[in-house]
Amino acid sequence: MRQGKHSIFWEIIALGTLILGLSFLGVPMLDAVLKPSPPHGIVIRLNIVESSGFDPSVITVKRGEPVKIILHGMDVSHSLVVPDLGIDSGPVEPGKEKVVEFTPDKAGTFVFYCGTLCSVKHHFMRGTIVVEE
Amino acid sequence: MSSHVVEWVSVKNHSALVALTLMVVILATGLTLPVFGQVYKADSQPRIIDITAKRFEFTPNIIHVNAGESIIFRIRSEDVTHGFYIDGYDYHLEIPPLSTVEVGPMQFNELGKLKIRCSVTCGPIHPFMVAEIIVEPNYVLPVFLVLTAGMFGTSVAYIGTRPKNRMLGISTEKELDILRIKVIGPVLKKFLQWRGSNYALLWPNLVIFMIVFASGFVGNPTGNLNFSIAVVWILWFAAVEFMILLGARLWCTLCPLPAFGEWSTRRRLYGVHRLKKWFSLGRKWPKQLDNMWIGALSFLGISLIVPWLVTRPIISGLLFVGLVSIATIMHLVFTKRNFCRSICPAGAYIGYHSVDSLFSVRSRDKGTCDKHIAKECMQGSPNGYGCPWLLYPGGNNDNTFCGQCFECLKSCSLDNMTLKLRMIGKDLPSIAAKAKGKFDEAWMGFIRFTLAPLYMIVFFGPTFWIKDWGNMSNVYGANWPTIGLLTPTPNALSNWLGWAVIVGGLSLAVYPAIFYGFSWLAKQAVGEVKQSAKDLFLSFSYALAPYGMTLWVAFALSLIMVNWAYPLNALLQDPFGYGWHLAPIDKFTWSPLLANMLPYIQAPVIFIGLAFAVNSTYNIGMKLFEDHSKAMKATIVMGVLHFAAALIVMFILAG
């Protein structure tokens, strides 16, 4: 209850917990760990072009291997359309996910774009999917 | 215990009992109104109502339908994907861009006002994209108006029975020594006297603030998906109003903003450093600034940018970085909590309303403190610092500047400091009677009181232009990398000036002027007294402390009951809006809780506020004039103004 002889001990404990508390500033860096990565799936974050568009906007996959794309809506509703591969995710609401699974059967570089009007620069919201042999 | 309770609430006067009973009946009527308001009519040919949704408005924004009428809504989105949700109806519709969706036929059987809300995040102002359906005949409004009048009438009738030192039948003289309650008391005392208690209470909020900083700068640019917005401006902002009521400046106990500065000056996190000299320049804070002016004006300043602050993470991030920096620098220059006393915008309004809290830190016996030469609560002792808030805790009778750091509980060697539970309005009359020259606190009251109904209109009303002016017509969310998207156009800036004039003008000039007018009338009504109209103006303004608090509680209820899912998801699952799933449960779907019941919960809260305002004015009047009939006359005049304010709020809730 009262301040005892061990106050330096408590001071050090407090300093340790303070540093631990301050370290939470770095929590966004955990994204690299918490975000699913291949083979669990490729995360594409959907932003309007004014912020960062498709994030990432270039993805690389292998022909004949199943692909799982996890779409996460960031700001307004978007969608992912890859006409050459016959993919249309349908609208993805902000704060929600949609999973697109397919197995590419041809190699090449294919354009994908957002199929849901999202901002004045909606038509510039594009990316590419590279299917390697 | 039970004898205590009887002592506290005993109403000796028969007519007072009748008045109080009627008040309870009025509150109950408000709450149960929806049960009586059901009307069923024969079905008819469906009527089609066309609505367009566009960021961030529905057109038309007010829709009148007849009870029982068969309605089909045909909603078209003119830009991005929107949602369509009606309070109390389980439709979560998605309206894709440039397309039309129909819903219905549906009927509305509850009379009164229902809100249409956007249910798919469509941009920063999305949580406040609102339209209204008025189900005719709207009996709810006249019933609310009559109940308000009834509440005013019964409040005046109640004070007509000469209740002495009472607030609505409950004694304002009795206090409960919390630290002497069985079991809880000793445990709480042991905890609060432990030197690590402040740090332990504060630490979780330190972690939360780190996440607020991080999410404000690099989190999802969309506010409702970002911790810094969802947790701070939905959960915290609402929770603080309840904290004030139950715990006065309890938030100040928990607040990490000034902690870095305080730890630095003390060079201690835990213990008491008995320094001759603090790690600080030790300057004296100017006397003319040792009041609430800067805090009140910075609260108003924040209100001028509030449509951005509560929707753009980066604005919140920058605000908090700014506040921590100022607080730290001020500690290093002025040593003590001058930032909290005089600068902090939250500190100002929390302090202002805290005088009416149920909670206080007080001495058990003031005589003991006055005789005690050591004055450890001011000077400090090996167990605790002298009051960092620059008070004399042993003689303190005013919550306004008591930051509840509990140092006096630790430093006092006579075990004379304690926590007390008391009725709302205990200290108010004596504080109000000594209001001479305290324009700062009066204006804090006016600003808070004016902004509560204004926020109800801006955030949860259907009027788009006022949201748009405050928001500078900007459709982008923003974090640090995308802050450039907030660059306003000249046209938007000139609209914002209009918004600033409305917000600033109403709270700084219009309402205070009206209040002064009523104070002048009150002066005429009471006749010969030694106080001037200006004195009455300042003293009676303190009735806005409890009244304003209830208005904000009503606002906080709509904030949290509608949007509870956003802060919960940010806390438990995905603080940065990156798509994380931290907890092994599903994310909460946005789904308002009892939103169709909100007006019936909010209105009784306002009724209680009106009764508080009337009773407080009377208690202040008694303190000033020491004469029942003069206090009564003044209360009736000022009461008319408070009654009018309640009527305006009823129009906002149900009109």
Image (spheres, coloured by chain):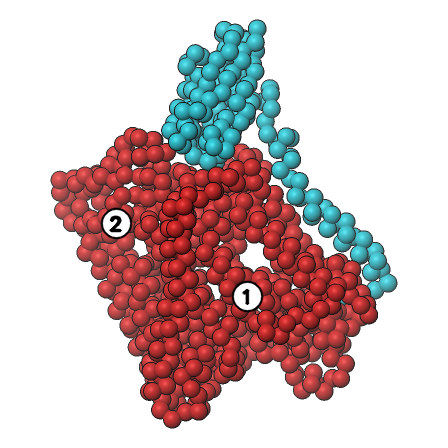
Chain colours: A cyan, B red
Point out residue B72 in the picture as x, y percentages from the top left corner.
21, 39
Horizontal side, residue B561 vs residue B156: left or right: right
In the rendered structure, the answer to whether residue B606 lies left or right of residue A75 reads left
Picture layout, residue B30 above or below residue B620: above
Circle 2: is it few (<14), some (14-19), or many (20+) Cα within 10 Å? Answer: some
Q: Nearer the viewer, residue B376 or B147?
A: B376
Q: How many marks?
A: 2
Residues B646 and A48: in front is A48
Please tell me in which quadrant of the rendered image residue B179 appears: bottom right
Residue B362: give x, y in percent of width and height.
62, 76
- Cβ–Cβ under 8 Å for marks 1 and 2: no
Q: Residue furthest bottom?
A: B528
Mark whose residue sits in front, 1 or 2: 1
Q: Position of residue B625 (x, y in %)?
A: 43, 90
Which residue is depicted at the point 51% across and 77% down? Answer: B438
The residue to which callout 1 is attached is B294
Report the Cα–Cα distance between label 1 and label 2. 39 Å
Q: Is residue B37 above or below residue A107?
A: below
Q: Amino acid at mark 1?
A: Ile
The reply to whether residue B563 is visible in this rendering is yes
Q: Nearer the viewer, residue B594 or B426?
A: B426
The spot of residue B27 in percent (x, y) is 34, 67
Return the residue at label 2. B62
Position of the N terminus of chain B, as image quadrant, is bottom right
Please indicate whether residue B195 sits to the left or right of residue B644 in the image. Answer: right
